[in-house]
Image (tube, helix red, strand yellow):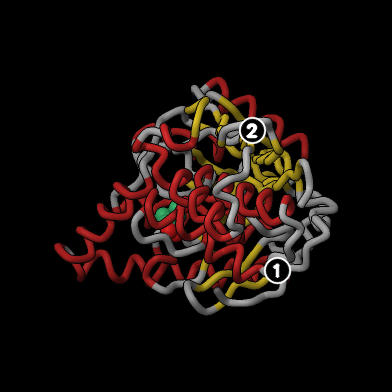
Amino acid sequence: MKDKATGKSYAKIIWFGEHSVVYGQPAIAIPIYSVDVTATLKKIPSGQEIHCRYFDGPISEMADNLRGVKTLTNHLISLFGAQDLSFDLNIESKLPSERGMGSSAATAIAIVRAFFGFFEVNLTRIQLLKLADIEEKITHGNPSGLDSATASSNMPIWFVKNEINEQIDFNLPTSSLVIADSGIKGKTSEAVSLIHDNIVDEPETAKPLIEELGKIAVSAKDALATTDDERLGKLMNQSQRDLAQLGVSNQTLDTFCRVACDNRALGAKLTGSGLGGCVIALAKNQSDAQQISTALRSAGATQTWIQSFKNYQFSTGEAHDNLVR
Ligand SMILES: C[C@@](O)(CCO)CC(=O)[O-]
């Protein structure tokens, strides 16, 4: 056992396939390395404390809105027989919460990694995702697993619920994604049940849209393999139309997409569960990305990030074993 260990994870951006992934369609998602979560577990003289932006104090006193993190932490305490250990768990997150960037999954992944690092026990990817799911099931109800799979990956992934979780390697050396936060909170569980209700109430409209979103993800994978950024942009626009028809966009997100496209974006769409949160726009080069980012800030984005794909591959030192959870 160490005196101190840290676990890291990343914000996730779903490029293609949010919502349809819940219904078995494929998705493409990417970790955003500059927007990360670090959990640090260290020994202290007494108590079991947790510090994060929503809570500061003993784990036993955590409020109900943090039930996911509390349950996961208690599960890890039992797993390692650490009931009598005095420790402090400090979570530092650069992710805004409820903005479609996978804040809860990233927090869960960082916590699990911190515990395994602290107890010096090897962690397999399957174990990591299963443990993160303890938190995600409480926070989101019926997660596809895409958020945790991406937050823990060091590469973009191609994902099919319970079937495929593999890295994709592509080369888009000049393009980048501009991510713009609308500042509006979007609850994943609400957006997921809204789509579920649409499928039940209007299956003849909703089901073909879900299937089309899956086909778009397949085409996008092909466009990535052939470095066809113009096609990727068009596929993003098509996704946005389908997601809006399914009811998870809103006026602000629609406006952001239009502003991005009026400012040289090759395409734009909401990312994550929608009903708020972030929009992503594909830029052909760095100067276009700057222009799009500035235009989106003028249109009201509270924060923007530019993720370039140059030298995207990097290593966390942990193998991504391409295993299904
Ligand atoms: C909306 C959704 O597809 C992504 C949320 O980040 C839900 C899920 O995959 O569990």
Q: Please name the residue that numbered disc 1 is placed on.
A: 168
The quarter of the picture showing ligand 1: bottom left
Of pointers 2 and 1, the one earlier in the residue sequence: 2
Q: In which quadrant is the C terminus drawn? A: bottom right
Percent of width and height locating residue 296: 56, 28
- What residue is drawn where x is 76% and y is 34%? 287
Disc assigned to residue 92: 2
> Is residue 234 visible in this depiction of the protein?
no
- What residue is drawn where x is 65% and y is 72%? 166
Please name which of the two marks, 2 or 1, marks the residue nearer to the observer. Answer: 2
- What residue is drawn where x is 37% and y is 52%? 138
- What residue is drawn where x is 60% and y is 39%? 179
> Is residue 9 visible in this depiction of the protein?
yes
Percent of width and height locating residue 204: 20, 70
User: 133 or 20, which lies in front?
Assistant: 133
Image marks 2 and 1: residues in contact by CB distance under 8 Å: no
Q: Secondary structure at mark 1?
A: loop
Number of callouts: 2
Q: Secondary structure at mark 2?
A: strand
